[in-house]
Structure formats: C-alpha cells, structure tokens
C-alpha cells in the first residue's frame, strides 16, 4: 500500500518536472529582446572613489567581453554612428560598492585581501525607457591582481546581456 502511495506521488511529480522544464526554457527564450547594437556609456562613480585604472579597465574589459559574447556592433560612449541604429540598447553602469583588496595579502594567505566591486547596470532604449536593471559583482579572491575583478565583472555583465538580448539579423 505504501509503495503504491509513493508511486502515485513521485511519478507524476517527475513527469511534471521533466515536461515543465522545456516549457520554461522556451518562455525564457521568448523574453529576449532583439537588438541590432549596444552602446556602452562610460562607467560612472560619483559616490564611490574609484581609481582611474579601475574605471578604464572596467570599460575596456566590458566592451571586449560584449564582443566575445557575440555582439558585433558595440559602440563606445559618444560614438555618433550609434544614433542612427534601430533597436539600439544603451548600457549605463554606475559603481555602487568598491573594496580594494591587497594583492600581497592574497599571496600570503588565500582567505584575506579580496577585491570586490558592485556595479548597477541599466539597459535602456535611446529614449530612456528602461529595459533591464541589475547589480553585477566582480571579485578576485585568491590569485591575481586587483584589476582581475574588472575582468570578472565584464564577463558577468556580458553574460547577463547575452541572456536577455539577442542580435537581430537584418
């Protein structure tokens, strides 16, 4: 009797899980917005004191990683060619948290000296309509220089972009 009860509960549960999963994947694919290009605005850090090398590394790594993610038309801040693009998405980034760690402390002990940075990413249309807003973290905990956190942020931000936007082919 107990076996029948277990089968009556678990078998429909497994069927539901395995049939609902592809449906959820289809829905997430349908939610992606089609874009023809992305314009990356310069990273802002009004409230947080950010060293110049971090600001530049964040911006350059982000542009490079977006290209690796498959976005062939990535425009820089102020590029006039982006103005005439249909389906353009503008990425605004603002530093919300920054903790510069110690490379020396990471070399001596692997559990201290971590560098972390949190950046609020806002994807908008050129008219200012917000499409997506998320906080993205970049960290370096064990090995590597402090600027490695900028590379970690760029990879995560590019992945977020790829998950939410697809390139429209015209």
Image: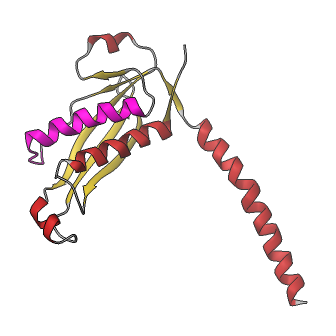
Give the x, y percent position of residue 28. 59, 43
The stretch in magenta equals 47-68
Residue at 72%, 54% in the rendered image: 20
Residue at 74%, 58% in the rendered image: 18
Please, is residue 21 above or below residue 36 in the view?
below
Looking at the image, residue 106 sits to the left or right of residue 34; the answer is left
Residue 14 is inside the magenta segment:
no
Coloration mode: secondary structure
> Is residue 37 in view?
yes
Q: How many marks?
A: 0
Please, is residue 20 above or below residue 157 in the view?
below
Give the x, y percent position of residue 100. 13, 56
Quadrant of residue 122 within the rendered picture: top left
Relative depth, front residue between 84 and 60: 60
> Is residue 45 in view?
no
Dominant SS in magenta: helix
Residue 57 is inside the magenta segment:
yes
Give the x, y percent position of residue 45. 15, 42
Residue at 77%, 68% in the rendered image: 13
Please, is residue 122 above or below residue 11 in the view?
above
Give the x, y percent position of residue 114. 19, 62
Quadrant of residue 64 within the rendered picture: top left
In the picture, the quarter occupied by the C terminus is top right
Q: Residue furthest bottom?
A: 1
Relative depth, front residue between 147 and 88: 147
In the picture, the quarter occupied by the N terminus is bottom right
């Amino acid at each position: 009797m107990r076996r029948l009860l277990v089968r009556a509960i678990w078998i429909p549960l497994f069927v539901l899980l395995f049939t609902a999963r592809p449906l959820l994947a289809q829905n997430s694919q349908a939610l992606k917005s089609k874009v023809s290009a992305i314009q990356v605005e310069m990273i802002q850090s009004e409230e947080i004191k950010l060293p110049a090398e971090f600001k530049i590394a964040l911006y350059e790594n982000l542009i490079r990683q977006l290209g690796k993610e498959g976005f062939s038309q990535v425009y820089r801040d102020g590029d006039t060619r982006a103005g005439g693009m249909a389906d353009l998405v503008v990425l605004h980034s603002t530093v919300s948290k920054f903790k510069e760690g110690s490379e020396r402390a990471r070399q001596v002990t692997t559990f201290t000296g971590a560098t972390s940075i949190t950046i609020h990413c806002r994807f908008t249309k050129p008219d200012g309509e917000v499409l997506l807003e998320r906080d993205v973290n970049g960290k370096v905990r064990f090995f590597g220089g402090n600027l490695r956190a900028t590379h970690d942020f760029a990879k995560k931000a590019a992945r977020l972009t790829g998950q939410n936007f697809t390139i429209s082919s015209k």
